[in-house]
Image (cartoon, rainbow, N blue to C red):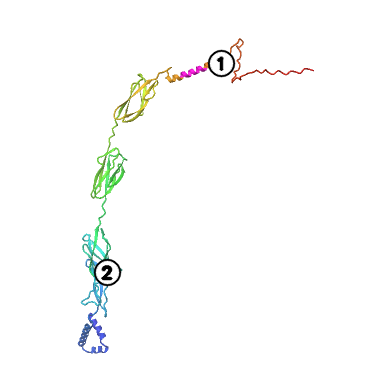
Amino acid sequence: MEYRFVLEMLGKEAMPSPARKRIGRTPRLVVFGVCCLLVLLVATNFGPIPLAIRSQTRPATGGVHGPQSVQDLAIHGGWTESAPANLESVSRGSPAIGPTVESYNVTLREHGLLAGTIWFATIAGVGENGSSGFAVAPQNIVFNVTAGNYSLGIQPVAGYTLQVDPIKVTVSNADVTKLATFFAVSPPPEYYNVTFNETGLATGTGWSVSVNGTTVYASAPAGLLFRETNGTHTYGVTPVIGYGLASETGNVIVNGASVQQSVIFTPNPPPAPPPMFEVTFQQAGLPAGKTWSVSFAGLTNFSTGSTLDFLVTNGSYSFGLPTVTGYTSSPTVGSLLVNGSAVIEFVRFTEINQILGLPPLAAYLLIGLLGLDLVGVVLAAALWLRRRGPAGPGDVNRTPPPTVTGTPSPTATSTPPPAPPQDPPAG
């Protein structure tokens, strides 16, 4: 069909109008022979009929959508339409007119993907739109390109990370193979409840547990909640004053389910009282029945006998002996050290000599005061008698002269009173 069209076109252009008229009157066999001769001449002088390649992309092996193509042929009058730079030239039996563009394979291999995983990649040159392709692991993705610099981009795959993305590729007169390395990403771990429950604590008592360095606090009877992954986890229970624990540490195993862990507290028995030791104060010097006392360890005890006893624990204590009338004590104050055994402290009382029923000092003071008073009375009486002088017969009711105080002058003269004025003589 195509050759008929060419023959018709060439016949119309090669033959003049009068000749066509003559051909129309000649037998058809002659016309056909002439046309065949003309076709033979054209093929001999001008070569094969020019063909132009018109490309249409198609998917390649491994699911590549890229520059591999099938060709549509179109006939043009006298020239060849060149193929795009990154497409392979294909002709039907006859080579195309013009330079041939070499193409090369860029193979992208994967490593690390689970078999059956679909993965995608793109390739793009500088300033060009990219082509994309996909494959099912472990298959490769292949791109067919011309020489140049390209960038391979790999789309993320769920559950994996890439070592390098994008991958730079330089194509120069040879095929190129590149490796895309995927690393599987572990899924996030599952967490499960680990609950610690106590028994034995009084309501409101604080308690705590540590797991993997995390400490949680609560007040009894509330429990303690942790969130842990599968595995063996070490825990520690903080001791509580007044309670005992069977074990302060332990392990809890989590294996795909929540875990309940019991912590048992046992109340401690009341502490035994500290040992007591006897401290005895033993006196000498007081008569039987005389009351005496000692102040010791915050207490004051009295006795009429020869000893006083106290019960105390180990330690250092001070003591004092209150005064006993008529006696002095030695020592009066002091300190004692009790250290695991009984202690005896000796006290000696000494009687004080009394005058008029008083101690000597008090008696001496009283006597001294009385003596002073007596001397004062005697002196006052003597002074009074001296000033009064000897008494006469008519001095019974005489009033003593007033007492003159002061120092008398060395010489005393009496001045007579002045004489009354005399009347002048009558003349």
Residue 351 spot, x, y in % from top left: 38, 19
Q: Nearer the viewer, residue 24 or 347?
A: 347
Does the magenta stretch mainly form a helix, a strand or a loop? Answer: helix
Badge 2: residue crowd in 10 Å (few <14, some 14–19, many ≥20)? few
> Mark 1 highlights which residue?
384
- Whether residue 130 appears in this view of the structure is no
Q: Is residue 324 left or right of residue 26?
A: right
- x 23%, y 88%: residue: 23
Where on the picture, by quarter, is residue 62?
bottom left
Looking at the picture, which amino acid does disc 2 mark? Answer: Gly
Tell me: 111 left or right of 219: left
Q: Residue 427, labelled with which disc?
A: none
Q: Quadrant of residue 116?
A: bottom left
15 versus 211 height, above or below = below
Which residue is farthest front? 410
Q: Which comes before the other along the chain, label 1 or label 2? A: 2
Specify start and end residues of the magenta stretch as a single range.
366-376
Name the spot of residue 208 as percent of width and height, x first: 30, 43
**Local SS, label 1:** helix
Q: Which residue is mark 2?
A: 148
Rounded to the nearest angstrom, the CA distance separating label 1 from label 2 is 157 Å
Q: Amino acid at mark 1?
A: Trp
402, above or below 127, in the image? above
- Quadrant position of the C terminus in the picture: top right
Is any part of residue 121 visible from this angle? yes
Q: Nearer the viewer, mark 1 or mark 2?
A: 1
> Does the segment drawn in magenta span residue 383?
no
